Structures are given as structure tokens and as C-alpha cells.
Amino acid sequence: MTEKAPVFDKIIKDYLHQIALMEAKEEVGASLGITVMDDRYRIPFFNRTYTIATDKIVDADGKTANHVASVILCKYLLLCPHRPTDDFSLVTYKDFRDAAPFVGGFRNTVEQPIASYFDSALPKLERRCLDLGGRAFETEVSCHLAMKFQALPNVPVILLFNDADEDFPAQATLLFQKNAASYLDMECLAMIGGTLAYRLQEK
């Protein structure tokens, strides 16, 4: 079994230390739509709830959160904006101003794998979306399936999927609200996409 690199533990410990020093915890909780009790934060992430304590991050079953989830949850707290923008228009990942270094990776590790895995398997994709807490999303964009996920309380994600036909391969596109950049950096938004892609394909 591959051991977790010590640097990962160091990164999370540093984030937890910064979180422990945060002030105005109740205001942060209200702004982010999360629950704060004592020095613990309860944060829903997709369809699972995690608790951030002073020394650990665990899911509802008490299992330690993986590194990706831990980073996203910590950054969601630490980057809490004083004045988030109220632009709720939907954009693709590449439309974010600072996304350029990650766009290729996002396409290759998030959207393309979803499209390939669920090629000619639309009913399976719909079932997996519902299992993960996704809900049908009304859109004027022409597609075979549109589903909305609540990645974090203030960060919804929309999946648009077109199955393959005789002219085009299957295509998957993720959309974010433009104000998502107020809550997370581009690396974390890419990791949210990666988490969704992984969980959709998870056995």
C-alpha cells in the first residue's frame, strides 16, 4: 500500500493551525453557510458532511478525510471573503481569469474522463448523479442531461452531458457560478471538478 507523503500531513497541519487562529468564527460560519460549534466546523461537501476540528478532519463516520477533500475544506474556511461578489452567472472553468495554468489538466482529468466513462451509458450517469445528491437542472443549453450538485454551501456545480452520436463523441462540461472565485482559488475549483469526476466513476 502506498504511504501518504509526509508533506501532505504537514500541509494539513499548517492549515488547521491557521484555522485555529481564526477570529469571528460565527460570522465566518454564517457567511459560508456552515455550522460552527465550539471550535469545530461542520461542512457539507457534495453529499457528505465533514467536521474540521483543531487536530483532524473527519467524515460523518469518523474516518479521516482524504488529502484533496481536506485541502478544499480548509481553503473554503481560510479564503472566506469579506465581500463575495454576487455574480451568479454560469461559466466554464476556462472562463475564470486565473484558470489558464489548469485548463488543460481540468479537461484531461475531469471533463474528458466523465465523457469517456459514460459514453453510451446515459441512464447509468443519471443514476450516479442522483446517488451523489445531484438534481435535474433546467437549462436552455441543448444537452441530454443537466444535473446540479452542491459541492459546498456556496459553490454549486452544474454538469452538462451530451451522449455520443454518429457525428460527435460524448461530451461533458462543468459549469460554476462566477462568484465561486470569491470562495476558492483555481486549484481548489479544479480539485472540486476532480472530486466529482472520481465519485461519479467510483464503484
Image (cartoon, rainbow, N blue to C red):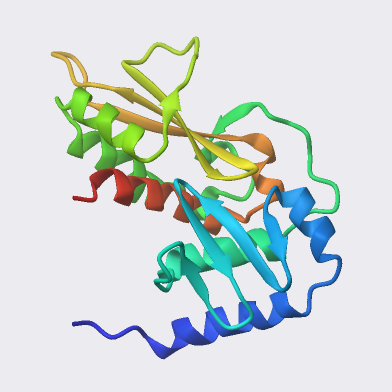
Q: Quadrant of the N terminus?
A: bottom left
Percent x, y of residue 185: 62, 56
Look at the image and tell me whether residue 169 can be seen: no
Query: As drawn, is 192 to the left or to the right of 105?
Result: right
* Image quadrant assignment for residue 38: bottom right
The residue depicted at 72 percent of the width and 79 percent of the height is 20
> What x and y, as percent, mark residue 104?
40, 48
Q: Is residue 130 above or below residue 48?
A: above
Q: Is residue 5 above or below residue 40?
A: below
Give the percent coordinates (x, y) of residue 171: 29, 28
Does residue 173 lie above or below 68 as drawn?
Answer: above
Residue 133 can be seen, yes or no: yes
Q: Nearer the viewer, residue 164 or 147?
A: 147
- Residue 73 as seen in the image, left or right of residue 111: right
Label count reads 0
Residue 15 vs residue 56, the one in the foreground = 56
Residue under the image location 43 percent in, 71 percent down: 62
194 is higher (above) or lower (below) than 1? above
Q: Is residue 135 toward the left or the right of residue 122 in the image?
A: right
